[in-house]
Image (spheres, rainbow, N blue to C red):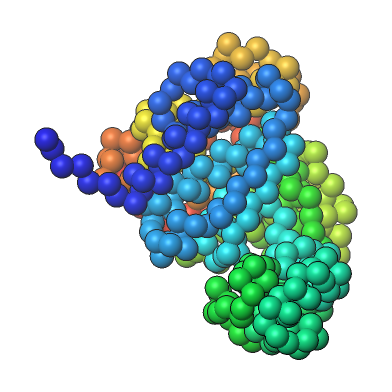
Amino acid sequence: MSNVVLTKEKIVLDILQNKISNLSNDFVIKLILTNLISRLENLIVGIYKKLGKIVVLIDDYDREIFRNKIIDDVLYELESFYNVLIRNDKYIKFFMVTGQLKINETGLYNALNSLQDISDSKKFGAITGFTQEELEDSLGEWISFTASEMNIAPSSLLDKIRKKYGGYCFDGKTMVYNPHAVLTCLWSQKLVDCPSKVKKSTEIKANNQKLLHTPNYSIINPGDKSFLKNRNNEIYVDKTGLLIYTNTVIDKDDKYICFSKPRRFGKTFLANMIAAYCDLEGKAKESFAELKISKHDSFNSFANKYIVIKLNIRKYLSRDRDDNEFIFNIKNNIVTRLAEKYKISSEFDDVNTIMQRVHDKTKLQFVIVIDEWDCLFRVFKNKIDLQEQYIDFLESWLKDWDYIALVYMTGILPIKKYGIH
């Protein structure tokens, strides 16, 4: 009998695969494909066709990250899993996750940054935990009973509970009690140690940023929601000077731009900005009001004049997928979305053919924004054949087409020669 090594990554994937299998059996949905991501997509669409939009509730979304100290392989697979849910949001009525870590502390920010984080919201400050009023009104009889069993006055017990289990604050205003510890105390009639081992007040400054609705993830004309989410931050730095430059190269030989910088240097922010400015369905005059670009002579000449295709390559990558699906999925997504939006037959499965047909029909040019273009090279470092196929695809898709006005790509790795390119 051969030994089987169960890695943390395999355990996580097996758990997800089993959950998907159980749900497909419950709803009598046949899943033909075997890889996790495709099965999840098929399950979502299958349930939608039978019952309508679905509600997705995920408890302890960060459990494996918290327990395994953020293992890269586990993290990557979880990010791919959540990416499927986000990009299929048209089938989802409501999506909620709970956990111990905030999204920006998990490494899942790229996948989940479109969610409303209500962790520090004043509106939901007392949604978890027991308030003083709830403790006295809803649990008054239990307080009296427990105090009697402990031979102390109810007021004395309340004071002990306050000192031992109180002092939590998640909105900068409302103090709450640890509910698990309080219930354990009342059930056992003794003061037990608080499970979290936190004895003092934990005050978190409330986030003043306006909560935004979850934007629909669309690769065709994504609009300005992502940009406005950035601009509506309490702290915003005007970087629209970049648009003044891109306006000088649009539809010229220098229209191909790549921006390589380390993580957290604003690459995605700039990609969202370019997409919002160029998107023909956007409202640049409102979105960019009072910013540098709005005062420039070139503003009206290029604002909201283009069909924007915006891709995040990370969303198409998963180590659970067949390598051959990677490029196909990008092509298929572009073709399908363009065919649906511009009422063109999808039998033309070539990206350039359908883009040419859209251009002929609308007389509009394309702006292509590709975020994390080099993600493939970082994830699959040793898969040279796949890297070459990817570069071949990018070259044939983007190079020397009159209907493309601008290409803007972001990445981490420096531009260099890959194979013959």
Q: How many marks?
A: 0
Residue sitting at x 55%, y 79%? 193
Of residues 379 and 138, the one nearer the viewer is: 138
Q: Position of residue 414 (x, y in %)?
A: 40, 58
Q: Tell me the quadrant of the picture where the C terminus can be found.
A: top left
Q: Tell me the quadrant of the picture where the N terminus can be found.
A: top left
Query: Residue 356 falls in which quadrant of the image?
Result: top right
| Left-right relation of 200 to 17 | right
Q: Position of residue 322 (x, y in %)?
A: 37, 30
- The residue furthest left is 1
Residue sitting at x 27%, y 40%? 384
Of residues 324 and 168, the one nearer the viewer is: 168
Query: Residue 204 falls in which quadrant of the image?
Result: bottom right
Q: Decide: is 341 above or below 36.
A: above
| Left-right relation of 225 to 267 | right
Q: Using the rendered image of the protein, determine whether residue 289 is visible from the camera's viewpoint.
A: yes
Q: Position of residue 227 (x, y in %)?
A: 73, 55
Q: Decide: is 360 above or below 102.
A: above
Q: Decide: is 242 above or below 204.
A: above
Q: Using the rendered image of the protein, determine whether residue 329 is visible from the camera's viewpoint.
A: no
| Left-right relation of 230 to 349 | right
| Left-right relation of 107 to 137 | left
Residue sitting at x 64%, y 24%? 47
Of residues 80 and 392, the one nearer the viewer is: 80
Query: Residue 121 falls in which quadrant of the image?
Result: bottom right
Residue sitting at x 40%, y 26%? 34
